Image: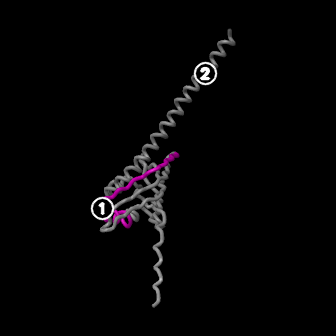
Amino acid sequence: MKTINVRRLMICALVLGAGVFGIYSGGLVSAQTDEVKAVTDVMMREAVAVELGDLAALDKIWANSEDVTVFESGHANYGWNDYRNSHLAPELKEFKDTKYSFADMKVKVDGKTAWVTFKYSLGAEMGTRKIESGGLGTAVLEKREGKWRIVHWHSSAPRRAPAPAASPTPKA
């Protein structure tokens, strides 16, 4: 009789332990999923803010600090103010009818750090010129004061084909 009670007790303990583990690990998955959604939301707000030329919204998405780094097509900006004021603001001011979107986003969260790889597409009018661009990017975000902020951005577009060489002029 004692053997049966011990066996039942062990089975109950295993079932209870498995249930607790399932609830606990489900909570971890849910928390991870919530953080992935929060990071994805930041990226979507980034795209909308660029389309609208909304610098105030971008100020809320990016870390407003000197440790921000941006590498775009071979050019570097160091610090949010440098990127915002010398690159982003002048560019957005010139863009009209802007369309900016991300595709194939892959988000990874590890504690207070997240990184996103993506494909981007940009279309805009700049004076009489029509811009059509796209490429690949990586964003690194940190959770600061409870909110995800972009701290690093690296994007690149495929190289343009070289202009065709001029044909030699025939000699007369």
Residue type, label 2: Ala
- Measured as percent of width and height from the top left, residue 142 is found at 47, 51
Q: Can you identify the residue that label 2 sits on?
A: 13
Secondary structure mostly seen in magenta is strand
Residue type, label 1: Lys
Q: Residue at x 39, y 58 (%)?
A: 122
Magenta includes 5? no
Q: Residue at x 66, y 16 (%)?
A: 7
Judged by depth in the image, the label closer to the viewer, 2 or 1, is: 1
Q: Quadrant of residue 163?
A: bottom left
Q: Residue at x 33, y 56 (%)?
A: 51
Q: Quadrant of residue 87?
A: bottom left
The residue carrying pointer 2 sits among few (fewer than 14), some (14 to 19) or many (20 or more) residues within 10 Å by Cα, namely few
Judging depth in this view, the residue of 141 and 107 nearest the camera is 107
Disc assigned to residue 43: none
Judging depth in this view, the residue of 172 and 20 nearest the camera is 172
The residue carrying pointer 1 sits among few (fewer than 14), some (14 to 19) or many (20 or more) residues within 10 Å by Cα, namely some
Q: How many marks?
A: 2
- Measured as percent of width and height from the top left, residue 120 is found at 43, 56
Quarter of the image with the C terminus is bottom left
Could you tell whether 81 is left or right of 113 in the image?
A: left
Tags 2 and 1 touching, CB below 8 Å: no
Q: Which residues are magenta?
A: 85-110
Element class at badge 1: strand
Judging depth in this view, the residue of 107 and 168 nearest the camera is 168
- Measured as percent of width and height from the top left, residue 131 is found at 37, 64
Q: Is residue 2 above or below residue 128?
A: above
First reached walking from the N terminus: tag 2 or tag 1:
2
Q: Can you identify the residue that label 1 sits on?
A: 96
